[in-house]
Image: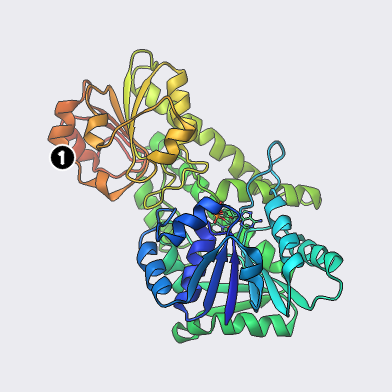
Amino acid sequence: MRIAMIGVGYVGLVSGACFSEFGHDVICVDSNRERIAALERGEIPIFEPGLDDLVARNLQANRLHFTHDLKTAVTGAEAIFIAVGTPSRRGDGHADLSFVYQAARDIAAKLSSYAVIVTKSTVPVGTGREVERIIRAARPEAVFDVASNPEFLREGAAINDFMRPDRVVIGTQSERARAVLRRIYRPLNLIETLILFADLETAELIKYAANAFLAMKISYINQIADLCEKVGADVHDVARGIGLDGRIGAKFLHPGPGYGGSCFPKDTLALMHTAQEAGTPLTLVEATVAFNDLRKEQMADRVLAALGGSGKGKRIAVLGLTFKPNTDDMRDSPSLTILPRLQAAGAEILAHDPAGMAEARKLMPDVTYCEDAYQTLDGADAMVLLTEWNAYRAMDLGRMHALMRQPVVIDLRNVYGSREMRKAGFDYRSVGRPKRD
Ligand code: NAD
């Protein structure tokens, strides 16, 4: 089947490459010409493990193509996926749907035969209907359906998530559209993936409800971690103890500096606004958002407290800048709140990240970026571990200690063992674990 993918970002590129791996003929289009030119040269514009091989293999097989010409992409495509960004709108937190609606207008202008127009972007309830209205108004004679197919992949594990999803959600009541989408995902029948069919509005809401629930789970364990610190309990044992309960589940119960990334912050805000406008405020989600904002500030204050209450004249080494490992995505990373707060308190920051530094440089130009994790530690008064990249798990503790001016380590991901760190001579602080361990 011929598929067009509009938007070649984290979701569009992975989805397009995976659909071609399924055996479909995929043309990806992006309004960013540089991005398309890079892809045509075989360069992958994002860091995602395994993506370079997947793209190269399918380019070679002539099943995957890139273009900046929407007409070329849309002509003859039975399914046209919209995978453009839906960032928070400045000022009010609503999802900014201008890219989605622009894509809808662009598609309307070029539609030549029956196609299902599928929103893969995360979009608020009602967006699919508006896409339908836009296309219908521009092209009253066109034969098309609109469907929602939200994406649940995680950056860093995106290919596996796409190829082996927990479920595929498809929102449309058109039988013709369902049949097209069923054919697209047919290769997943082999691994018995459940395809959940719903109506447009329901599918749109499922995505937000899922992300808000996961964000809530993270905030919940972060609050439990705070409580553990006060009462001398161990948050990891609590997480294990509750996670073994099948009704709760073990995932997303790892304490840390607060959630970030390209999805949870903006999606919780957008859902909150949708619910407020519908007159049914989601107070649990509102509390999650407020607590997560506070959490990041509290983590900066925790670092300053470890330095005696002030950052003046202090040099802080930061390991990890991205919101999680195995991605170069800096969008809404906790580092973007924590580092400026430390700097505002007078501290000098030396940072390292295996993949995020190019983007971080643009967002935080007054940080000193080091090519090697050990370089950040030279003369440091404290080290803060912000992202749990594997490379940081196996640091040479003796070398770390020798480099630092003061051996203070604030491990916001609980990567190291408390006992081991104390034995190595560090003033070691982590999250939600008792001091005695
Ligand atoms: P992104 O910013 O990485 O990519 C969006 C791409 O769309 C950009 O390359 C941009 O140039 C292009 N674009 C914008 N308008 C266009 C237009 N009119 N025509 C052609 N191209 C256009 O975004 P992303 O992270 O891939 O996210 C896309 C959507 O998927 C968002 O709604 C997001 O919430 C959702 N989502 C993201 C993830 C994730 O992990 N990143 C996971 C699930 C869902």
Q: Residues within 10 Å of mark 1 (few under 14, many from 20)?
A: few
Give the quadrant of ligand 1: bottom right
> Which residue is most to the top?
313
Identify residue type, mark 1.
Answer: Asp
Residue 173 vs residue 8, the one in the foreground:
8
378 displayed left or right of 433? left
Residue 81 vs residue 259, the one in the foreground:
81
Residue 346 vs residue 73, the one in the foreground:
73
Question: Residue 302: x and y, percent?
Answer: 41, 27
Name which residue lies at 60% across and 83% down.
182
Residue 100 vs residue 278, the one in the foreground:
100
Name which residue lies at 48% across and 72% down.
64
Q: Is residue 346 above or below residue 284?
A: above
Query: Where, quadrant-wise, is the C terminus in this rendering?
Result: top left
Query: Where, quadrant-wise, is the N terminus in this rendering?
Result: bottom right
418 displayed left or right of 188? left
Question: Residue 52: x and y, percent?
Answer: 37, 62
Question: Residue 409: x and y, percent?
Answer: 28, 31
| Label 1 SS | loop
Q: Can you tell me whether the CB of the residue at mark 1 lies under 8 Å from the nearest atom of ligand 1?
A: no
Q: Which residue is mark 1?
A: 396
Q: Is residue 145 above or below residue 302?
A: below
Q: How many marks?
A: 1
Q: Is residue 417 visible from the viewing direction of this image?
A: yes
Q: Locate residue 156: give its quadrant.
A: bottom left
Q: Please, which colouring scheme is shown? A: rainbow
Question: Residue 374: x and y, percent?
Answer: 22, 34
Q: Is residue 165 visible from the viewing direction of this image?
A: no
Name which residue lies at 62% across and 51% down.
267
